[in-house]
Image (cartoon, rainbow, N blue to C red):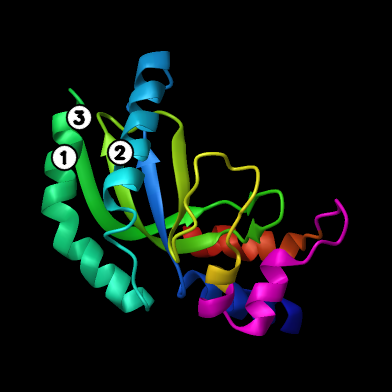
Amino acid sequence: MFTCFYIEKVHSEIADSIIRLHIIANSDSVEDQQQKLAVRDFVLERYGKTLKAETRDQALEKIYGCLPQILKDVQDLTDQQVQISISESNFPTKIYKDLQLPAGNYLALKIVLGSGKGKNWWCVMYPPLCFQDASSVTDKEKLKQVLSEDEYELITSQEGTVLYKFKIVELWNKLKAL
């Protein structure tokens, strides 16, 4: 029971330290997936530097300030309906080459294209760790600046290729998501 609450606390603290970018395609068609990636590339190129900040709150303030312009720009880029919001979303565990973000609810800049029934793409927008090739994280020092030592160790420890899971923690997270 203690392990479950400790892991939950650390996961929550990690989620409270970062902001994610979440882009959902209209469908899984080749065209819609290409459009999702074009939106991703555009948002990262156009707003990646603009949204750099010293704290999560500053980053959030900048994102809110840019929302109308991001919406307009994405609408100009695509021929689909666009919905944009900043909201909590449940993300699965994401394993990169040298980083593992735990599953949980994270605050995210969410861009939904069309019906939003296609595959999605996400990254860590604050601190800025978005990259197009999800095989490695090149600037983990940014995470080190916003996470505690325990949180940083949890997501960057490399225990070989074994991923340890607790079924009770997974069930707890599913219950919370409901």
Q: Are marks 3 and 1 in contact (CB under 8 Å)?
A: yes
Where is mark 2, residue-wise? 42
Which quadrant: the N terminus? bottom right
* Residue range of the region highlighted in magenta in the rendering: 144-163
Q: Position of residue 174 (x, y in %)?
A: 57, 57
Dot 1 or dot 2: first in sequence order is 2
Q: Are marks 3 and 2 in contact (CB under 8 Å)?
A: yes
Q: Nearer the viewer, residue 137 or 107?
A: 137
User: Is the residue marked by circle 1 packed among few (<14), some (14-19), or many (20+) residues within 10 Å?
Assistant: some
Q: Position of residue 49 (x, y in %)?
A: 32, 57
Q: CA distance from mark 3 to mark 2?
A: 9 Å
Q: Nearer the viewer, residue 66 or 163?
A: 66
Q: CA distance from mark 3 to mark 1?
A: 6 Å
Q: Nearer the viewer, residue 173 or 22?
A: 22
Q: Position of residue 154 (x, y in %)?
A: 71, 71
Q: Residue at x 51, y 65 (%)?
A: 176
Q: Are marks 1 and 2 in contact (CB under 8 Å)?
A: yes
Q: Please state the total of marks drawn on the protein image.
A: 3
Mark carried by residue 35 = none
Mark carried by residue 77 = 3
On the question of residue 123 being in view, the answer is yes
Where is mark 1, residue-wise? 73
Q: Amino acid at mark 2?
A: Phe
The kind of secondary structure element at disc 3 is helix
Q: Position of residue 150 (x, y in %)?
A: 68, 81
